[in-house]
Amino acid sequence: MFFRKSYRSRVTPRKIRAHLDRRFRNIGVYVFDSIDSTNLEARRRLSAGSGEATLIFADEQTKGRGRLGRSFYSPSSTGVYMTLILPREAAAGSAMLTTICAGVAVCGAISKLTGKEPKIKWVNDVFLDGKKVCGILAEMIESRIIVGVGINLTTDDFPDDIISVAGSIKTDVSRSRLTAEVANRLLGMVTGFDREAVMREYRELSLVLGKRISYIRSGTKKDGVVSGIDDEGRLVVQTAEGIDLIGSGEISLGSESFAE
């Protein structure tokens, strides 16, 4: 494919900083050729007493992490694998709301730099053309929030267990520029948190509003139609028994739900 060669250009702290907003250029920026997980590296830095806002980028992850203990496939040179240790004054206040901010940030960055229009499957997956192209993992560590973002850019050889759902953006955009654009947007949102504006944009990007979903509640499979997303990021689901609020766990949609 024509974009593969340009993608292998080396990402460096200097290249990322060149695209960071002036107000964020004092954050720590660290780049690894290969690492177990950028979120695990963030944990190590916080455990060692690091207090600064930090961006960690890896060309490859050997133990990339996703939600619910899953792994995130992170091969060399084909994606953006990054974690932000958010500043202490980050105002989003919870891992859930920070995840929502990150989803909006990723979609906005991809749209700006590629012209494509990804959508968000609640709560943390970004989809494009019916395939998952990005996963997000926000965690509270040492009273700080860290946010891991993995974006498939040119990956085209996925393991068998995810090949039916995983996809790539397929773009020649600079990884350094996309990394910085995601960071700019996310840092901007969490340091000047405007819940109403963020939730409005998140709802506009949602793949699940108005769709029928299934989920597990207290060990029982349930289904219903998503009628809204409240200001805490919870799904408002109309079931046969009435309204149900979902604030954690996982939902499933039929394949037709990804047609938009």
Image (tube, grey):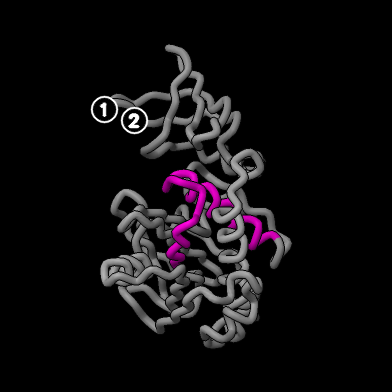
Q: Which residue is mark 1?
A: 219
* Crowd around label 1: few <14 · some 14–19 · many ≥20 (10 Å): few
Q: Which amino acid, by three-letter code, is at mark 1? A: Gly
Q: Check the image and report above or below for 171 versus 226.
A: below
User: Where in the figure is residue 219, as x and y percent of width and height?
Assistant: 26, 27
The region drawn magenta spans 83-111
On screen, 217 above or below 2?
Answer: above
Question: Cα distance, mark 2 to mark 1?
Answer: 6 Å
Picture coordinates of residue 223 (x, y %)? 43, 24
* Point 64% across, 76% down: residue: 19
The residue depicted at 50 percent of the width and 55 percent of the height is 90
In the drawing, does residue 231 fall left or right of residue 63? right
Point out residue 86 in the picture as x, y percentages from the top left corner: 46, 61
Q: Position of residue 35 (x, y in %)?
A: 34, 77
The residue where tag 2 is placed is 216
Report the side of 204 relative to 222 (left or right): right
Q: Residue visible at 43% across and 76% down?
A: 58
Element type at marker 1?
loop
Task: Classify mark 2: residues with Cα within 10 Å, few (<14), some (14-19) or many (20+).
Answer: some
Query: Is residue 223 something that shows in the picture?
Result: yes
